[in-house]
Amino acid sequence: MSNQKLLNEIIRLLGTNSNIASATNCMTRLRVKVKNEELVDKDAIKKIDGVMGLVEDETIQIVVGPGKAGKLMELYNELYADNATPTNNWEENKSKIKGNQKQSKFKQSLRVIGEIFIPLLPAIIAAGLFNGFAGLITNLQKTEILADTALLNNIRLMLSLMGGAFLSYFTVFVGINSAKKFGATEALGGMIGAMTVMGQINDISMNLGLYNVESPLNSTLRSGKGGVIGVILGVWILAKVEKAVRKRMPDVLDLILTPVISLIIMSIALIAVIMPLSGFFSDGLVAVLEALVNSSSPVVSVISGYVLAALFLPMVLLGLHHGLIPIYFVQLEQMGGVTLFPVLAMAGAGQVGAAIAIYLKAKATENHYLKRIISGALPAGFLGIGEPLIYGVTLPMGKPFITAGLGAGFGGAYIMLTHVIANSWGPSGITAIPLMSDPNSMLNYFIGLVISYIGGFGMTLLFISKDDVASVDGN
């Protein structure tokens, strides 16, 4: 089915384009807000050839796979977006508000964080890979596997330039996206993000007696204190301050005085409260992660690694995994590397192993539907994009979703036990190997993937029968 036919069929089953209030996409999903959910045929959408699953929250998330989601969104913007009409139905708005109230505050917070970071994912992945390859060249030159030539040095510098262009100013991008989400002026949100990493913060901290010269990282206030957690919190408060100031400001003075007054208030709040408070939280979080990663007890490492990897798939299922990005950034800033990402990456490898086991049983039972679905989703799974396998194979069958997580736990335990560290984060499959900090971490990460493949395969082969596979027909 062509992309245009697929899009037309999805829109038809959503109740036609007139029922679409707004639409966007992430790497693998179309995220659609509809005006009247009763007009949506969700079961029929799931059965469309090319649709791998459907997730419901405040939006309808249609899983179509990596690459295709972006192409379908481009087609939608070209063919349909201009004809979409906003909804002003108070009953629908009331229903949406009630729907949001049913979610826990924690779940809502993670979703908001995810919505801030999802638009940044392409740049996060690209920057992570650039920095990863630059680090690989550096490590190979140190071990004299690669020569220290001008050509390689320039390649390494170019890769570092491209990676650093994003990650060095990550807080600015987060500030802008947070402002979009919370309703603040985007440029002011970017300024909040930039202020948190400016060198003047350290000078102010010294003047206030809050800077620890002997151990700068332990300062109550310093440049970068609180990381993106402080930026998100700061921009959230900025949105409220800016609206309050604008409400009281005469129209003729609004353009000049509203941003000035808002930033003066926020600068004081940022230095006096927000950065120290979010920094305290970040420091505590890092301390817990360091205790797990650097634990002298192999038992602690194995148990924590197993549990983290095994439980990560439910977060992916709920679309909450993007909420972990601030933790990755805090680790990178304070520990010099990310240890949580390599552990959680094993969850996708468990999916791959489970899918291979199901494929073999589908082949034995001549289930051509499952063979086709798995064949199309496996390449993305090996590259670290697990949603096609989750929504197309393991989740609809039920038990494989559990066995994949249980198998992935073995890889997570190995990763934690061997203290694998990444320079950044990005795709979580074999393409993440260059993101690891050194050749030893690269090797252990690969071994962890293999263990997770085998774990997911073995657990699924053990607990899934041929009858379970034969009963899946896609209807």
Image (cartoon, rainbow, N blue to C red):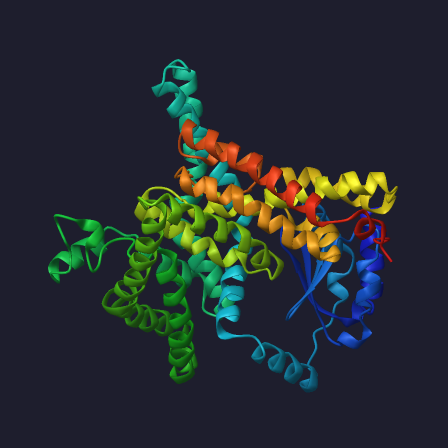
Specify whether residue 385 is in view.
no
Left or right? Give the position of 429 relative to 65.
left
Quadrant in the picture for residue 26: bottom right
From the viewer's side, name the closer residue of 328 and 362: 362
**x 40%, y 28%: residue:** 157
Q: In what quadrant of the picture does the C terminus appear? A: bottom right
Left or right? Give the position of 166 relative to 18.
left
Specify whether residue 333 is in view.
yes
Position in image of residue 9 (x %, y %)? 85, 58
Quadrant in the picture for residue 36: bottom right
Left or right? Give the position of 322 relative to 454.
left
**x 64%, y 71%: residue:** 58
Position in image of residue 175 (x %, y %)? 42, 59
Position in image of residue 298 (x %, y %)? 37, 43
Position in image of residue 60 (x %, y %)? 70, 66
**x 49%, y 53%: residue:** 307
From the viewer's side, name the closer residue of 25 and 238: 25
